[in-house]
Image: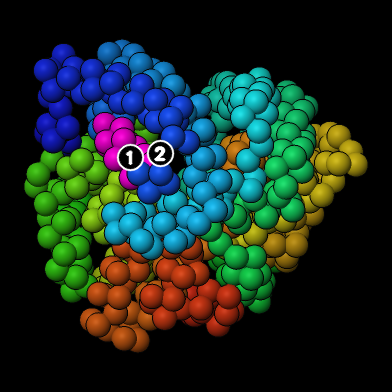
């Protein structure tokens, strides 16, 4: 009961269909290798057509085989057969790296690529993908250098990242006389008991002392590798590389950050009002940022959650309503926590079936209903891009949270409007503002911190204490007098894994982008009504085949104009005014 059905993929690893697909994979990889070796002997159009045919089938096969194994493992981490099969598939995937790199280099050397695409109808669908392969080539090194870089990264950034994960997951936190995990003590920040929140915060801060220098060493090493790689590849900076990977202009980021800065006083007003309501004199201590307020004892069964969401989504779009109904009734969702199942929640698109699968750990709270709405928003986004070839279904990080956050806004706006009493309304608004504060104010502090680390790294190796100084400085600039400057969190650099990637820097501003992009779109929906829905779906469909700015223009949005971002921020500022009235 409540488990997902994976029969659309396979019914087992030992089935004829799974084994036949594994064998087919072993045939296709040599085909790709052969094409890489002979591509210069073919005409450009013939080579590109053959590449897309092989790559399309190979991608579909790898996706199908890997998704089944991954979903099996996520539902039961003791499924050793699934874990073993994942390793087997990843080993096969690694064999495609060298021929793929060779082919992409050959594509980048086709001088009249645009003309060939225009004159070959079959290739037109893949114009964005092929153009990006050529565009990306300017940052490629030689084949030998790429191989060396890939191998060295295993003992470089990747290893340092693993060290941070290992130290933070293994550190013991002394709380109330017992040793607990870092994640457990951090979860106590949401406790309704003020004493618990404060003691948990103090215990968390104390635990970092034993691992801080090792993690600082890891962060210094990763950031130096990123700087070195950017210099070798020709990126202006790590931020420039991040924006390029996001298919996003610097002007868009400047408009986003500029609008966020304008609205920081509104968030500080919210934090000071919350501080006063919690009995503090002045600003809010960091350990009370996540303190719950108001009260809502309402619980939901799975059927309650289904009916609640369907009622909301029916008023927005029939396709969304019908997809969510299908998800609940046809085994798309693995609902309940159980021993061996991974925590949290995620959506996984299944291109071969043009469906999705959603994992959640549902316990009946309203927060879990919102989580379902969020993940099913990702499923709706999946649905919009499934009409493309599998080679055209990937979209960049900034737009990845658009449909999920849009669903959240739909649900929260309805819930707040229909709140039974003042306590429930306060609880819902506070939950919404707490999340907004994280994706705007805290994300801004993380952006400032990471920028300062990259700026300082060429001149100095930063000790843990220096990292703490930079983090405190970033928090003071972002939170201002909203937080008590004597009770900030100097170790936020240590516990956030997003800083510890050699391939993905500035994994922070996309959260602010996603949250505000969805809110800005929601404001347009409220202004335009039903006609906007078709535009919204057309835009989601384009997220995988257009740069961010071009995609947004479908919805009539200029992302380089602060005014658009202000619309989303103003909707939050209006909620802050409402919150302040409720807690007076």
Dot 1: within a 10 Å radius of its alpha carbon, few (fewer than 14), some, or many (20 or more) residues?
some
Q: Is residue 456 visible?
A: yes
Residue drawn 52% across and 49% down? Answer: 110
- Compared to residue 59, the image places residue 445 above or below, namely below
- In the rendered image, residue 446, in percent from the top left (x then y), is placed at 66, 52
Q: Which residue is mark 1?
A: 50
Tell me which corner region of the image, top left, top right, bottom left or bottom right, holds residue 505.
Answer: top right
Front-lying residue, 340 or 9 = 9
Task: Give the tally of numbered discs.
Answer: 2
- Compared to residue 239, the image places residue 232 above or below, namely above
Question: Mark 1–mark 2 contact, CB under 8 Å?
Answer: yes
SS at mark 2 in the image: loop
Q: Earlier in the sequence, mark 1 or mark 2?
A: 2
- Please provide the residue range marked out in magenta: 47-61
Which label belongs to residue 42? 2
SS at mark 1 in the image: helix
- Compared to residue 450, the image places residue 532 above or below, namely below
Q: Quadrant of the N terminus?
A: top left
Residue drawn 72% across and 29% down? Answer: 218
Residue drawn 66% across and 37% down? Answer: 141
Left or right: 80 in relation to 42:
left
Front-lying residue, 402 or 113 = 113
- In the rendered image, residue 243, in percent from the top left (x then y), is placed at 61, 56
Q: Is residue 140 magenta?
A: no
Tell me which corner region of the image, top left, top right, bottom left or bottom right, holds residue 543.
Answer: bottom left
Label 1, label 2: how many angstroms apart (C-alpha)? 10 Å
Front-lying residue, 370 or 101 = 101
Query: Which color scheme did the rendering employ for the protein?
Result: rainbow
């Amino acid at each position: 009961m409540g488990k997902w059905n994976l029969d659309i993929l396979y019914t087992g690893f030992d089935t004829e269909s799974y084994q036949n697909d594994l064998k087919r994979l072993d045939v296709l990889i040599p085909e790709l290798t052969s094409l890489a070796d002979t591509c210069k002997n073919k005409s450009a159009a013939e080579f590109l057509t053959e590449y897309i045919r092989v790559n399309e089938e190979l991608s579909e096969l790898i996706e199908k085989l890997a998704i089944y194994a991954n979903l099996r493992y996520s539902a039961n981490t003791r499924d050793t057969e699934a874990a073993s099969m994942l390793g087997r598939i990843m080993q096969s995937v690694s064999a495609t790296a060298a021929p793929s790199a060779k082919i992409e280099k050959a594509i980048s050397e086709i001088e009249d690529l645009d003309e060939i695409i225009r004159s070959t109808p079959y290739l037109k669908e893949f114009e964005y993908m092929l153009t990006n392969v050529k565009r990306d080539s300017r940052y490629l090194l030689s084949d030998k250098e790429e191989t060396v870089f890939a191998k060295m990264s295993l003992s470089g950034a990747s290893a340092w990242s693993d060290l941070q994960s290992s130290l933070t997951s293994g550190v013991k936190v002394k709380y109330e006389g017992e040793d607990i995990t870092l994640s457990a003590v951090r979860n106590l920040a949401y406790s309704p008991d003020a004493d618990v929140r404060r003691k948990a915060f103090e215990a968390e801060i104390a635990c970092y002392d034993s691992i801080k220098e090792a993690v600082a060493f890891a962060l210094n090493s990763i950031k130096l590798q990123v700087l070195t790689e950017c210099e070798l590849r020709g990126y202006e900076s790590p931020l420039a590389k991040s924006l390029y990977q996001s298919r996003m202009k610097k002007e868009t980021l400047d408009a986003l950050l500029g609008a966020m800065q304008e609205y920081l006083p509104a968030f500080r007003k919210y934090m000071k009002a919350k501080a006063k309501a919690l009995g503090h004199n002045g600003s809010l201590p960091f350990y009370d940022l996540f303190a719950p307020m108001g009260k809502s004892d309402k619980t939901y069964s799975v059927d309650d959650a289904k009916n609640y969401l369907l009622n909301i989504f029916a008023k927005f779009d029939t396709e969304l309503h019908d997809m969510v109904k299908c998800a609940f009734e046809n085994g798309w969702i693995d609902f309940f926590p159980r021993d061996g199942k991974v925590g949290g929640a995620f959506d996984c698109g299944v291109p071969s079936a043009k469906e999705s699968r959603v994992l959640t750990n549902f316990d009946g709270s309203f927060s879990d209903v919102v989580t379902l709405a969020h993940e099913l928003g990702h499923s709706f986004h999946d649905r919009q891009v499934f009409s493309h070839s599998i080679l055209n279904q990937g979209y960049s990080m900034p737009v990845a949270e658009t449909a999920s956050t849009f669903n959240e806004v739909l649900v929260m706006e309805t819930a707040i409007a229909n709140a039974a009493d003042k306590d429930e309304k306060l609880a819902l608004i506070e939950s919404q503002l707490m999340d907004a504060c994280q994706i705007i104010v805290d994300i801004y502090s993380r952006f400032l911190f990471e920028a300062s680390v990259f700026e300082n790294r060429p001149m100095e190796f930063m000790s843990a204490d220096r990292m703490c100084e930079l983090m405190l400085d970033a928090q003071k600039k972002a939170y201002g007098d909203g937080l008590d400057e004597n009770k900030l969190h100097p170790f936020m650099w240590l516990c956030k894994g997003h800083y510890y990637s050699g391939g993905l820097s500035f994994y922070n501003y996309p959260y602010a982008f996603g949250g505000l992009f969805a809110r800005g779109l929601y404001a347009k929906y409220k202004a335009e009504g039903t006609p906007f829905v078709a535009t919204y779906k057309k835009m989601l469909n384009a997220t995988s085949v257009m740069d961010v700015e071009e995609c947004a223009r479908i919805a009539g949005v200029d992302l380089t104009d602060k005014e658009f971002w202000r619309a989303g921020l103003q909707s939050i500022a209006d909620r802050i005014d409402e919150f302040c009235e409720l807690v007076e």
